[in-house]
Image (tube, helix red, strand yellow):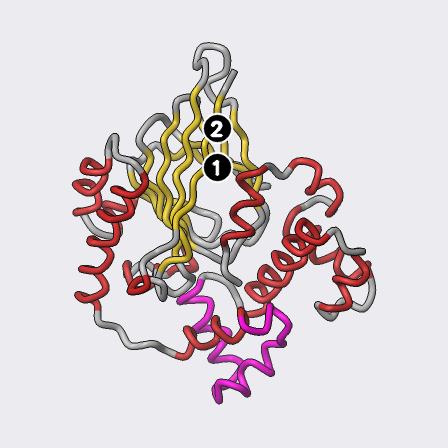
């Protein structure tokens, strides 16, 4: 019988502009019966993940490809569709859910190249992450958060990057719960729509419309989980004026229906939705 622990922790006030939350996920069970027993299916969240894996390999299952992650520290870029992660028995994963603009401050790799993809973080971000991984080994979540925040704080001071208009674009989309058109967003920021599209994709990894749709769909699913309100009422709140429009966008992201998704999302996936501070 496998046991599953999923713990979350908020960042310090100083690092709130860079991190949504931290999580620790541990699974214990009989490896001989099934080495990859736990499968977690998650909606795209509009975030980038930095993961510290302390035992075994992870399997990322996208709709059109499967990737094996055996790096001790990895960074996973933006997802534009629903994906599943399979974790081994006796796994120990510490994750950092980064805000959308944080990743481009930590690496020179164009973030759009990481879409639906994960790479070795200590090689592409900073070699000190390997040492940090060693210090975290066997620690509890509080110690891991403290160690990571010391590392991230030093990186933020080193970079000293001022906010750019894509930061404000993300903030505007989140404040409006995804209910905004790209041309309206461009006018609000006083930039051309073409420039906004190009810069947003380079720094965030998605186009503004894709990101807004992800934010909006996450709100709807979260509200549906929380309130059990009639779906048609929620859709009207988010400016879907017929179910077919929502079904089309939801299926494009998940390749399934809302009722089917609700049937196989698990507690950890729901916790992710609740923690993302849209």
Q: Residues within 10 Å of mark 2 (few under 14, many from 20)?
A: some
Horizontal side, residue 209 vs residue 190: left or right: right
Q: Where is residue 218 in the image (x, y as percent from the top left)?
A: 61, 56
The residue positioned 45% from the left and 17% from the top of the image is 29
Which label number is shown at residue 60? 1
Residue 2 inside the magenta-drawn segment: no
The residue positioned 40% from the left and 53% from the top of the image is 21
Q: Where is residue 245 in the image (x, y as percent from the top left)?
A: 77, 62
Which label number is shown at residue 4? 2
Closer-to-camera residue (192/46): 46
Q: Where is residue 173 in the image (x, y as percent from the top left)?
A: 54, 72
Q: How crowded is mark 1: few (under 14 residues within 10 Å), some or many (20 or more)?
A: many
Closer-to-camera residue (207/237): 237
Image quarter of residue 31? top left
Which circle's residue, 1 or 2, is located before the other in the chain?
A: 2
CA gap, disc 1 and disc 2: 19 Å
Closer-to-camera residue (11/245): 11
Residue 196 inside the magenta-drawn segment: yes
Instruction: State which mark lies toward you, 1 or 2.
Output: 2
Q: Magenta segment range?
A: 175-204
Horizontal side, residue 171 vs residue 72: left or right: right
Q: Position of residue 73 (x, y in %)?
A: 29, 41
The residue positioned 58% from the left and 50% from the top of the image is 81
Are circles 1 and 2 on residues that touch, CB within 8 Å? no
Which label number is shown at residue 257? none
Closer-to-camera residue (5/239): 5
């Amino acid at each position: 019988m496998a046991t599953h622990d999923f713990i979350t922790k908020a960042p310090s006030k100083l690092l709130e502009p860079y991190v949504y939350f931290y999580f620790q996920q541990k699974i214990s069970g009989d490896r001989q019966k099934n080495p990859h027993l736990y499968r977690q299916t998650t909606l795209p969240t509009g975030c980038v993940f930095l993961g510290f894996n302390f035992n075994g390999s992870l399997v990322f299952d996208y709709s059109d490809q499967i990737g094996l992650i055996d790096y001790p520290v990895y960074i996973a870029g933006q997802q534009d569709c629903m994906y599943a992660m399979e974790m081994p028995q006796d796994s120990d994963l510490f994750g950092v859910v980064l805000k959308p603009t944080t990743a481009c401050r930590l690496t020179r790799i164009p973030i759009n190249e990481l879409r639906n993809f994960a790479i070795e973080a200590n090689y592409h971000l900073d070699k000190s992450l390997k040492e940090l991984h060693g210090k975290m080994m066997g620690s509890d979540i509080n110690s891991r958060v403290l160690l990571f925040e010391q590392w991230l704080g030093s990186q933020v001071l080193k970079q000293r990057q001022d906010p750019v208009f894509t930061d404000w674009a993300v903030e505007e989309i989140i404040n409006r719960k995804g209910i905004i058109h790209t041309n309206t967003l461009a006018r609000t920021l006083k930039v051309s729509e073409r420039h906004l599209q190009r810069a947003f994709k380079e720094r965030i990894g998605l186009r503004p419309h894709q990101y807004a749709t992800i934010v909006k769909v996450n709100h709807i699913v979260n509200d549906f989980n929380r309130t059990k309100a009639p779906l048609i009422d929620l859709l009207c709140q988010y400016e879907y004026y017929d179910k077919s429009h929502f079904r089309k966008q939801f299926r494009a992201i998940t390749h399934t229906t809302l009722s089917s998704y609700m049937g196989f999302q698990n507690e950890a996936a729901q916790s992710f939705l609740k923690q993302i501070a849209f």
